[in-house]
Amino acid sequence: MIQMKEVYKRYPNGIMAANNFDIHIKPGEFVYVVGPSGAGKSTFIKMMYREEKPTKGNILINGVDITNLKASRVPYLRRNIGVVFQDFKLLSRLTVYENIAFALEVIEEHPKSIKKRVMEVLDLVGLKHKARMMPDELSGGEQQRISIARSIVNTPKVVIADEPTGNLDPETSWEIMNLFEEINTRGTTIVMATHNREIVNTIRHRVIAIENGLIVRDEARGEYGYES
């Protein structure tokens, strides 16, 4: 599903954020990416959806080498990758329904199909009753649920989450994690960067630990391994 082959990423200031990443993530896996702040986790995540390009090496998503993908092809790549951010990134002037529908409208999906699919994902995240509300009328947890619904509305093979519980209280964080678990059981590959020690140690999955741009640990059903 996801392969990184001898991937390096050096920024203009000389920081090496990825030093010979060699990773294979199988379809349907759930992978945590952990490590101290500034270790290279965000770079790892961003290279998967071509927000960042590696300095050297190759990245394959579902068999397609995205390393030198033309800019015009990047939107097509992202149709098969759902991305969830810490700060939600919802469009403030659109309703909940419109925020999710927008992801289907840009690929010119049929209006009837859009309505059906949007209501399906709203039902999955438990917010069908808030379809007509605006983002600023929702709690942080509800906004993140909408962000997740938007990320899966295209039925992507991969969902990439960058600190999705970072701005949420503990109880809401567990609710969000249960939602990711449900999405994963339906066959979606999930790669999640997180600082949440308790979640990683409780809901066990593969753990990739990054320090100073190096992968220092890659364990099935691993632990967080850092102080909170």
Image (spheres, rainbow, N blue to C red):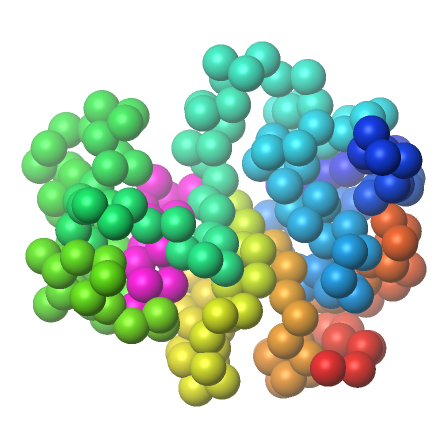
Q: Which percent across, then down, holds residue 24?
A: 75, 45
- In percent of the image, x 58 and y 13: which residue is there? 70
What is the magenta range? Answer: 142-157
Using the rendered image of the protein, determine whether residue 102 is visible from the camera's viewpoint: yes
- The N terminus is located in which quarter? top right
- In percent of the image, x 64 and y 60: which residue is there? 193
Q: Which secondary structure type mostly characterizes the magenta part of the structure?
A: helix
Residue 195 position by quadrant: bottom right
Q: Is residue 54 rendered to the left or right of residue 158?
A: right
- The C terminus is located in which quarter? bottom right
In the rendered structure, does residue 149 fall within the stretch colored magenta? yes
Observer-nearest residue: 137 or 45? Answer: 137
- In percent of the image, x 61 and y 31: which residue is there? 50
Residue 66 position by quadrant: top right
Observer-nearest residue: 65 or 19? Answer: 19
Observer-nearest residue: 12 or 98? Answer: 12
Q: Which percent across, then down, holds residue 59?
A: 72, 31
- In percent of the image, x 37 and y 63: which residue is there? 144
Quick check: 176 above or below 191?
below
Using the rendered image of the protein, determine whether residue 5 is visible from the camera's viewpoint: no
In the rendered structure, does residue 153 fall within the stretch colored magenta? yes
Q: Is residue 50 rendered to the left or right of residue 53?
A: left
Q: Which percent across, then down, holds residue 150?
A: 33, 49
Q: Which percent across, then down, holds residue 18?
A: 84, 42
Q: Is residue 123 rendered to the left or right of residue 176?
A: left
Observer-nearest residue: 107 or 84? Answer: 84
